[in-house]
Image (cartoon, rainbow, N blue to C red):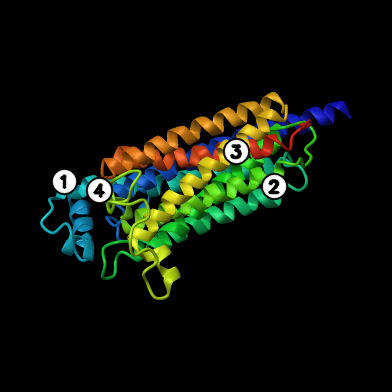
Amino acid sequence: MTMHTDNTLNNDRRIAQWLLFCALAIFVMIILGGVTRLTESGLSIVEWKPVIGTLPPMNNLEWTREFEQYKQFPEYQKVNKGMSLDDFKTIFYFEYSHRLLGRLIGVIFLIPFLFFWFSKRIKPGLGIPLLGLFILGGLQGALGWFMVKSGLVDNPRVSQYRLAAHLGLAVIIYAYMLWLALSLLQTRDRHPTVFSKRTLGLCAVIFFMIITGAFVAGTRAGLAYPTWPLMGDSFIPANLYATTPFWLAAFEDITTIQFNHRILAYIITIIIAWLGFVLWRSNPSQQVKLAILLLCSALIMQVGLGIATLLNHVPVALAASHQGVAIILLSSALFLAHSVKVGTRMH
């Protein structure tokens, strides 16, 4: 019985390590996707070739053919007309790297999954969630192409709705993968506490803020008011929700989109400060204390990067870092939500 338990624990640990490695790859993928968008490289590859697209152009003839295809679409005709082949190669490689990493993530997930599955190392109840992650990964690739197609018609910009969906699904896959890994690594009993719903609610609010960030990126709303703490001359700018119907402004009006993103950041700051204070005073476990410190550190970094990105007119390095730390903030919140349910006793 003890040997069987030890084998189960070892298998769970190996599966958790594999999931954490996959989650790290997705984290890099999210950052690379942000860089691809910020450098306006996402529309440089105008075909979706899941298999034969694994290799880039290998000679001058193939590069010329790829460039000529790109010239047939709005981004070249309206934005980059006259660009050189060398300039095209630069934006091509950003998008190519993003797509290639997506394919690699599929491989590093599928092969170990099949090994664990056929060697019966996956405990009952875990196989379906893991299979679900793989299916979601395939859907994510299709959704990425669906997003790119929106920028290949008339307007050489991808739809902010499709961008938000693409990023949102990536974050969901990452978060669920991280949660499964944490559950496998934790050997103590898990039970709800008074803070369970509150910490999970915080995770949901952070996820929602990430989605609003996608709308900021998709509409370039971050360039509209490069000032802080005011938006222009006032904290609450004029013409908020000045659309018909009014709710459409949250998705299409750049003033409203940036304002909403800012307000959510303030709300999250208040929630984390309050939740951290109350949790710390409740005499939690050392794991919960560590999670609080990580969460507060990530929050400080994220707020600082957000303000710096805004004031400096959204430079690539700062904006990509801001997106990356948003995922770290969510990860810290997930770690806290998991920690308050693991062998903790609030006094």
Q: What mark, if any, has residue 274 been given in the picture?
A: 3
Tell me which label, 2 or 1, sits earlier in the chain: 1
In contact (CB < 8 Å): disc 2 and disc 4 = no
Residue that carries the numbered disc 1 in the rendered image: 86
Look at the image and tell me whether residue 146 can be seen.
no
Look at the image and tell me whether residue 12 can be seen.
yes
Task: Answer with left or right where residue 155 lies relative to residue 247.
Answer: left
Task: Identify residue type, mark 2.
Answer: Lys
Q: Which corner quadrant of the image does residue 340 belong to?
A: top right
Distance Cα–Cα, label 1 vs label 3? 52 Å
Distance Cα–Cα, label 4 vs label 1? 9 Å
Image position of 155 with respect to 291: above or below: below
Outermost residue to the front:
234
- Of 192 and 100, which appears nearest the observer? 192
In contact (CB < 8 Å): disc 4 and disc 3 = no
Q: Nearer the viewer, mark 1 or mark 3?
A: 3
Residue that carries the numbered disc 2 in the rendered image: 197
- Of 190 and 120, which appears nearest the observer? 190
Image position of 69 with respect to 121: above or below: below
| Secondary structure at numbered mark 3 | helix
Task: Identify residue type, mark 3.
Answer: Trp
Q: Nearer the viewer, mark 4 or mark 3?
A: 3
Quarter of the image for the C terminus: give it: top right
